[in-house]
Structures are given as structure tokens and as C-alpha cells.
Image: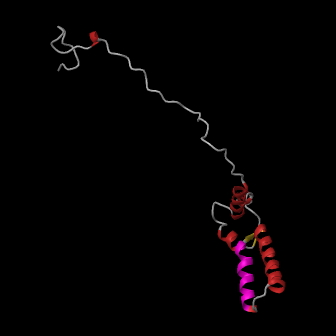
Amino acid sequence: MALNPTYKHIEASLRIGAFTLGQWAQILFATVLALLFGVYVSPLPLTVTIFVSIVLAGSPLALSYGAMAQEWSAPEAVRAQWRWMRHPRRYLPGPSSAGTGYVVTPPAVRPVEPAAVSVRGASGEGGGLWDY
């Protein structure tokens, strides 16, 4: 009986070679960025321009490829950082309002009646806790 392995790969992302489609898009973008920087923008000598083009344009792809086996995503981390930086931080002056929540109060203590306490020998029964 032949086993069909299709169903275990349904939720896996599409890969061409070792990269996902998003990573191929990053490779294309990094290549175009490196070529534009190297040909039109860079005022540096040729060897330095090639080095800087490859390192700067390939850094996002290297980060993405390195984080591929991790539990977090580099684009999600960048988006979360961007949201946190743009979040307004305006607080009203003065102390904060009273907090709400649970209030813990001690249980009510019931006084012990004198007739319930018996000391051995004080009452004629002697059936107290300290009898052996």
C-alpha cells in the first residue's frame, strides 16, 4: 500500500529550492537594491562598493534565512517595533485613579465561650483534649 505524503505538507509554505516565495522576493529586491546602489549611488571605490552593496542589501535576507527555523518572524518583529514606536505616550499629570480589583479582608474572629474550654481537673469530666 502506497502512502500519500500530500496531507502533511498542506500547511507548509511553498518552497522553491531552499527558499520560500517571500525570500525569493527579498533576493530579487536585494539584487536590484545592490545594483542601483553600486551603479548609481555609491561614491566609494569599486571593491568597497561591491562589499557594501552585498552586505547592506543581503542583510534582510540573511536575517530572514537565519530566523526561518525559529519561533518568531523578522518582519513581525519589525512591525511590532514600529507599532510600539508610533504608539502615543501621553499620560495625565498627577496620581493615577484608585485601582479596582479584589479586596482581601480577614475572616471574622468568633470569641470562644468560657464553658467550651475545659482544663483537666477543673471540671469533673476530664474528657478534654489533653487526656491520654
Query: Residue 36, relative to residue 105: is it above or below?
Result: below
Q: Quadrant of residue 57?
A: bottom right
Of the 4 image quadrants, the one containing the N terminus is bottom right
Q: Position of residue 42 (x, y in %)?
A: 79, 85
Q: Position of residue 26 (x, y in %)?
A: 77, 72
Q: Position of residue 16 (x, y in %)?
A: 77, 71
Total numbered circles: 0
Q: Quadrant of residue 37?
A: bottom right
- Residue 49 part of the magenta-drawn span: yes
As drawn, the residue found furthest toward the top would be: 124
Q: Position of residue 15 (x, y in %)?
A: 75, 68
Write down the region rendered in magenta: 47-61
Give the residue at x 17% y 15%: 120
Tell me: 60 left or right of 37: left
As drawn, the residue found furthest toward the front would be: 94
As drawn, the residue found furthest toward the left would be: 121
Evaluate whether residue 4 shows in this view: no
Q: Quadrant of residue 9?
A: bottom right
Give the residue at x 23% y 13%: 118
Q: Report the magenta stretch's main SS.
A: helix
Pick whichever, 41 or 9, lies toward us: 41
Query: Residue 66, relative to residue 50: is it above or below?
Result: above
Give the residue at x 74% y 73%: 17
Evaluate whether residue 123 shows in this view: yes
Pick whichever, 45 or 54, lies toward us: 45
Pick whichever, 125 or 106, lies toward us: 106
Give the residue at x 72% y 77%: 58
Tell me: 132 left or right of 105: left
- Residue 66 part of the magenta-drawn span: no
